[in-house]
């Protein structure tokens, strides 16, 4: 059970990392488009 819990926690951390990465890429795209517009 402990191994399963560790794996689940690791997967959650990886998912949060992916979400933050996609969020930052979206922010970067918004910023670049904003700079191009202005």
Image: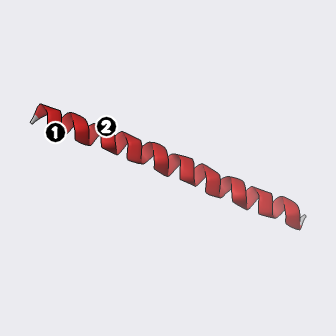
Q: Is residue 38 left or right of residue 19?
A: left
- Residue 18 place in picture, x, y as percent: 55, 47
View extreme (left): residue: 38
Q: Is residue 8 left or right of residue 4?
A: left
Q: What's the CA distance linking mark 1 and mark 2?
A: 10 Å
Q: State how the image is colored.
A: secondary structure
View extreme (bottom): residue: 2
Residue lying at 9% horizontally and 36% vertically, measured from the top left: 38
Q: Label 1 neighbourhood size at 10 Å, few (<14), some (14-19), many (20+)?
A: few
Which is nearer the N-term, disc 1 or disc 2?
2
The answer to the question of whether label 1 and label 2 lie on touching residues, with beta carbons closer than 8 A, is no
Residue lying at 87% horizontally and 67% vertically, measured from the top left: 2
Residue lying at 40% horizontally and 42% vertically, measured from the top left: 25
Count of numbered badges drawn on the protein: 2
- Residue 23 place in picture, x, y as percent: 42, 46
Q: Secondary structure at mark 2?
A: helix
Above or below: residue 4 compared with residue 22: below
The image quadrant that residue 35 belongs to is: top left
Q: Is residue 13 left or right of residue 27?
A: right
- Residue 34 place in picture, x, y as percent: 18, 38
Q: Is residue 38 left or right of residue 8?
A: left
Q: Secondary structure at mark 1?
A: helix
Q: Label 2 neighbourhood size at 10 Å, few (<14), some (14-19), many (20+)?
A: few
Residue holding disc 1: 35
Residue lying at 51% horizontally and 47% vertically, measured from the top left: 19
Residue holding disc 2: 29
Which label belongs to residue 2?
A: none
Above or below: residue 9 compared with residue 14: below
Tell me the quadrant of the picture where the N terminus can be found: bottom right
């Amino acid at each position: 059970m402990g191994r399963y819990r560790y794996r689940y926690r690791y997967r959650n951390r990886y998912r949060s990392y992916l979400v933050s990465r996609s969020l930052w890429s979206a922010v970067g795209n918004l910023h670049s488009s904003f700079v191009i517009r202005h």
